Amino acid sequence: MGSAAALASSRMILMRAAFFALCALVVSPALAQAKHGGVTRHYKFDIKMQNMTRLCQTKSIVTVNGQLPGPRIIAREGDRLLIEVVNNVQYNVTIHWHGVRQLRSGWADGPAYITQCPIQTGQAYVYNFTVTGQRGTLFWHAHISWLRATLYGPIVILPKKHASYPFPQPFKEVPIVFGEWWKADTETIINQALKTGGAPNVSDAFTINGFPGPLSNCSTKDTFKLKVKPGKTYLLRLINAALNDELFFSIANHTLTIVETDAIYVKPFKTHTVLITPGQTTNVLLRTKLKAPNVTFVMAARPYATGPGAFDNTTVTGLLEYAKPSSPSKPKASKLPTLKATLPKFNDTAFAMKFVQKLRSLNTAQFPTKVPQTVDKNFFFTVGLGLNPCPQNQTCQGPNNSMLAASINNVSFVMPSTALLQAHFFKQSNGVFTTDFPTKPPSKFNYTGTPPNNSMVNSGTKVVILPFNTTVELVMQDTSIIGAESHPLHLHGFNFFVVGQGFGNFKPKRDPKNFNLVDPVERNTVGVPSGGWVAIRFVADNPGVWFMHCHLEVHTSWGLKMAWVVMDGKGRKQKLPPPPADLPKC
Ligand SMILES: [Cu+2]
């Protein structure tokens, strides 16, 4: 299929997303009524190589079913999903259902060597989980090395039957998935970087639904176009599936109303620009103009970047085109003038802070905000970059012949060679992990001030043990050891409440007084402000092993990750069931 045809068909698919979603819900023969009131939905993910041409270059990429972005998962709240993943590529693969709570289904969470061994070439694994108490937009992506560069796609969770949105029913629903494209092979890039200790190459372009848009080389035809009718409300399901970049997003001369983040409703508010970090999802309402204007509007995204390293400073654009009622089949949009979108500066941390502070939970009788008012255990984690020494007889490309690293409380996480969850469940943790992850930094220093003399990190596979139902407060503090930087931290298995955030060093006597314990935003990924801190609360009500890591993939590769082990409770429904028979082996 030519790119124009591909574009046309993908556009049609997107425009009819909601329609098809509803059809699938009504007619799919694969559905079976389950005892919890939801239905069971079956999907098959064939992991296969596919040639794809972007930026005038063709390369073979790892895909699900040959698609980029991959297929959309659609379910209703309460439905059970059975997704068979068959690995037909040379790489080990796992898929993570990002933001799905996975209540007592940790075996289906997906991070390689945390909850499962990878699916090896020629093998298959059925991810089996139920979507409980969540509705909105999430996404799925590969969770091993950098394969998520091309293995990602939307998860759309519709409200239960006969339940409605707490906002006007949209005319159409459209996923807008941001991705990142490298001309070179991403596995080679990260493997090289980890060997030499230097920073991996930045991407060559960002994409919207797989397309870089006209500002990139050879990409005029590879442009996502959103065709709209005047006077309608569209629900845009924004997903940041990029690897290493937080993004600003805006549509020329249109206001967006934010209604949901990370599959939790928020108090609606209007904005011209959305900030979305990797790992975050945001639903926005787009109200189109009453009369179709003789203008095509640009939608654009580019990075919010604060770190010391290089970043991809390109802009991805798509087009918002109004259909003319007189000639619905052939709008001459290409002849219309285009109106550009304006975006904040790359390092506009003031905008970023203002934006995230506007996010509040809906907190109504139907959707209450159950933020814990008391805390059982407090943790204080520093997050940031550091260094490892260069191995003897080698030259390294980090600062002063060192290797770049990243850590939490100065522990750079070492991936085990077997899955932590298996080791935990079968009580075989000896030699796999230790339970001494530090609850606070090994030494106090001015975290956001002049860096300490020693910037070397420690290494280990360390976890925190939490008894069932522990209420946790966690303050995450950015460090400026190599350079202050915003880090989007993602917690598996839970949503958390963002009760506070600020710049500089967290002050335990001063800052908690200002925590929002009424309507804090609830999410699964939060930006630790550049040169600042964020405080979150969650209840450890989900037994299993839960990964927490920076969703800038390069930082995760360098070790900015750890795991929580949540013990079984006493009740029958408070225990993790045994693993499924087809759980992959290492
Ligand atoms: Cu990070």
Image: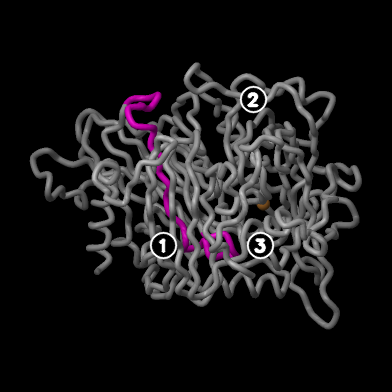
Residue 135 among magenta residues: no
Q: Residue at x 54, y 67 (%)?
A: 93
Q: Earlier in the sequence, mark 2 or mark 3?
A: 3
Amino acid type at circle 2 is: Val
Residue 157 among magenta residues: yes
Residue 374 picture quarter? top right
Query: 34 and 141: which one is in front?
Result: 34
Q: Which residue is mark 1?
A: 45
**Direction from residue 384 to residue 326 in the image, left or right:** left
State how far apart marks 2 and 1 are (Cα). Answer: 37 Å
Which quarter of the rendered picture does the C terminus lie within?
bottom right
Residue span colored magenta: 142-168
Amino acid type at circle 1 is: Phe
Query: 396 and 554: which one is in front?
Result: 554
Per the rendering, the mark at residue 113 is 3
Q: Which residue is mark 2?
A: 371
State how far apart marks 1 and 3 are (Cα). Answer: 21 Å
x and y percent of residue 381 in the render? 78, 43
